[in-house]
Amino acid sequence: MNYTSTRGTVAVNETYALLHGLAEDGGLYVPSLFPTNCLTYNDVKDKNYQEVAAVVLSKLFPCFSEAHLKEMINSAYSDANFSTRDIAPLHSLLEKVSVLELFHGRTQAFKDMALSLFPYLLVAAKEAEGEKKEVLILTATSGDTGKAALEGFKDVPGTHIQVFYPTDGVSPMQAEQMQKQEGDNVNVTAIHGNFDDAQQFLKRLFVDKDTAEEVAAKGVMFSSANSINIGRLAPQVVYYVNAYAELVAQGAIHEDEAFNVVVPTGNFGNILAAYYAKKMGIPIGKLICASNQNNVLTDFFESGTYDMNRPFYTTISPSMDILESSNFERFLYYISGEDSERTAGWMKDLKSTGKLTVNEEEFNRVKANFAGAYVDDEETKAIIEQVYNSYGYVMDPHTAVAMGAYMKELEKHPEDGARHTIIASTAHPFKFPTAICEALDIKVGDTPYESLDNISAVTGVAFPKQLEALKSKPLRFTKAIDKENMKQEILDFVDTFSK
């Protein structure tokens, strides 16, 4: 299968796209010929998560042999990496609402679902391409991607990873997870700025030929672990396909019955993966895009205009504190009718004016698949409290945003209540101790760990062993730099391992 850029017509093979991440013209790689309607219930019936992954990913990466793909998948989704053999279990909250728990991996966030497999895909792609350079993974994070990428690439031969995160844009527990990261090939740096600042810089760097030549002379090349890389996005499709199979197996829906999906998202990758599952034949009905107060996506789904010219808010759901959603470009490509020239024009508009608008025909394609709603911090806390008091279930702030968006969409469209809905739960609640304490009126401790002990005592939720283990680990990465110094930080890191 070939992959092409959302902004151009040059086609590359799968392993090139996996290895390089971003296209040379600044666009994102998408399948030249998308495998539309290639999945049925019989393809995934009675299969475990690993087997479903092999079916789905063989459609997107047919370059890998069946045996090799299964080997990588089984290594990624092992008992060593996930605390439940179901990998992504469904928790029944209401008769028509299930919570898809995506936080049972090494870092208790949905990013583990892709970043447990992606390093295997990248190393395999590197070998297939005959690439001898050391690969430096450059990653911007709003909280969860960074730790998951660090854990995934920790001490993987031939790779190194540099993560940037905003000083005030992650929870204390997310910060500790990154600051205490182990591994000889990792570097973590905070920046005085927000996630968009870090992400925009890295996207510019990926198409900076002078810097690429400078590091190439030292035997190094850049790649990405953000979902701009198709190797990060593709494994996320799997858990929506698997959830569909589980719903049918449980008798919650019939095999040809549509179900809705609600996804809390800032960078748009997680909900785009659900859209990919739908395009591949899974009977997903409405995709509800849940946002926090940084509601640029909600406004787009209501108006057809994406406008970044607005205040940036730091919220209690920090992984969604994003105004420039990178994967949104792939979605625009599809609603344009896969018109790369049209997509390139939109991205030029976004860069020059901070906004873009789709036409009526394109907006009709949007509304045929998507809806959007947003929830502010006070509403988020109220939902955490309401769900716990009603069902004894503790949601993290991002999952609560999704629940709130579902409730708001249900008010506008009561008929949706007759259709089964999946809420994508993207993080373990213990990653956000202060928000949970405030929502449930539990005493906030002097440290995050004291707060978590208090939460555990009240709710009975067990302390995840990975977070418990953080207590005794030393801080390794405490540097904070101005965002203008990111390039120098990268070059300095390159000098520590380059030839």
Image (cartoon, rainbow, N blue to C red):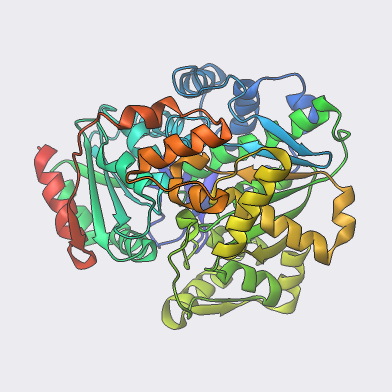
Evaluate whether residue 214 shows in this view: no
State the residue at coordinates (64%, 44%). 424
Q: How far across and how far down the image is residue 402, in percent?
A: 64, 53
| Drawn side of residue 437 relative to residue 484, left or right | right
| Residue situated in front as seen by the camera: 33 or 205 | 205
| Residue situated in front as seen by the camera: 323 or 84 | 84
Q: How many marks?
A: 0
Q: Is residue 443 above or below residue 268?
A: above
Q: How far across and how far down the image is residue 29, in percent?
A: 49, 52
| Residue situated in front as seen by the camera: 61 or 140 | 140
Q: How far across and how far down the image is residue 286, in percent?
A: 77, 54
State the residue at coordinates (45%, 45%). 433
Q: Is residue 84 above or below residue 12?
A: above
| Residue situated in front as seen by the camera: 195 or 153 | 195
Q: How far across and how far down the image is residue 138, in percent?
A: 30, 48
**The quarter of the displayed image where residue 359 is located:** bottom right
Evaluate whether residue 77 shows in this view: yes
